[in-house]
Amino acid sequence: MVCLLSLSVVAFWATITAELVSSAHAQEARLQLKNGGPPATPPGRIASPVRGTTYPASYFPNTELLNADEMRITALGTGMPNQTRAAVSISYLVELGNGDSFLFDIGSGSMANLFSLRPDFSRLDKVFTSHLHIDHVGDFMGLHIGGWLSGRYTPIHFYGPSGSTPELGSKAFVEAMQKGYAWDLATRTGALPDKGAKIVVHEFDYMQENAVVYEKNGVTVRSWPAIHSLDGSVSYSLEWNGLKYVFGGDTYPNNWYIKYAKDADVASHECFLPPDELAKYFGWDLKQATYVATRIHTSPDAFGKVMSAIKPRLAVGYHSVQSPENNAAIMDGVRATYSGPLALARDLMVINVTKDDIIVRMATVDDYVLPPAVSEAYKNAPRTEEKSPSEKVEAGKWQGYTPPPMPE
Ligand SMILES: [Zn+2]
Ligand SMILES: [Zn+2]
């Protein structure tokens, strides 16, 4: 009895969430309730647009309808390759008032934070990757397969740079991932919508300068080179409706960023640990830490100089380890060279951007969330035959159990 009740509650919540998500995209002012039923969400969790600057102190996913001229940027991961529960690897989600969604990087661990927002996965079909380090692409296959399970029934698009040789480029990376996950992909094909299995790679020249990578529905994404380890790291800008977000790839401070990140409303750029703190954090000697923090990456004082040069409406520093010991050193470094608006990003920090205001908050999410409900289009999308094991394996089925008949 208890179990049945729980299941019906789950089904109820799945239904109302589907309504929430779809109404959010339609920019409707109110949640439409079917059959005149009770309110679909607890008090304070009705999806509605925010007027003026009266944002709640926390961002509760799927409760705020974006206004038509509004951009919402969520830092899904802001940390290091050795991710922690407090800071997973790099990823940013950008949602626009026109209903479009974009992911910039999808580093290891970031999928859990993305999932905690219970997004409409049918719209999360494109990732723009800055470079092919695991802390920037490690959860790509998790997004591909997790999103395919949770509502995406069309191909996913991987936008990424070439490398100095073909085998170091995005195309080679995705092909290798598909080979490595051949068994996984083969088992799911048939059970899940066929088209959702496909990955489309859009590899572009890492040296292109402020050139268009993507242009659709009033949104333009451009790329330019970054300087990091080997050739093949890039930064991006996303422009829409007079707003500009810049996502800086891992880099030594570079001329291209100074030139093309100008006029950004929100400019994110790595802001690594200073050498002393990096040495302590990893237990490295100071020489190695200084090399990594100031030759491969951008230390806080250098980040501050970059931001003083481009003067964004909001500077966002990320790719760090924010701990009580480190925060002061990071902030001191930045503030030695930059006095403008600043947010040091943490996982699940949310930035709402309009022409008039920029609001920075943290999201409040549950550790346990249900998958977002899938659409009718997802359920009805063509599927080939489901796979099954060979006869010699099937022959090992225990006769002591008989499964229930398949529903019609
Ligand atoms: Zn990197
Ligand atoms: Zn990195």
Image (tube, grey):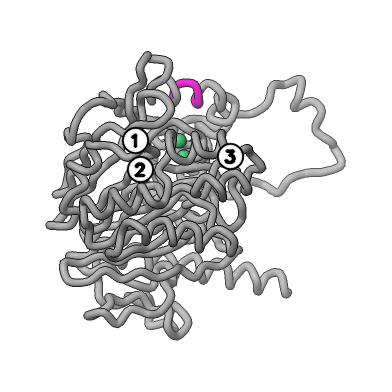
Return the mark for residue 286. Answer: 3
Among the two numbered marks 3 and 2 on one chain, the one whose residue lies closer to the N terminus: 2
What is the distance, in whole Å, between disc 2 and disc 1 at their CAs? 6 Å
Q: Does the magenta segment cover residue 334?
A: no
Ligand 2 has an atom within 8 Å of the beta carbon of the residue at disc 2: no
Tag shown at residue 330: none
Q: x%, y% of residue 380? A: 40, 45
225 relative to 53, above or below = above
| Structural distance between the alpha carbons of marks 3 and 2 | 42 Å
Q: Residue at x 17, y 71 (%)?
A: 356
- Write the start and end of the magenta stretch as one range: 174-178
Q: Are marks 2 and 1 in contact (CB under 8 Å)?
A: yes
Residue at which label 1 appears: 157
Q: Secondary structure at mark 3?
A: helix
- Residue 177 is a magenta residue: yes
Q: Residue at x 33, y 52 (%)?
A: 268
The residue at which mark 2 appears reads as 125
Classified by dominant secondary structure, the portion drawn in magenta counts as helix
Identified by mark 2, the residue type is Asp
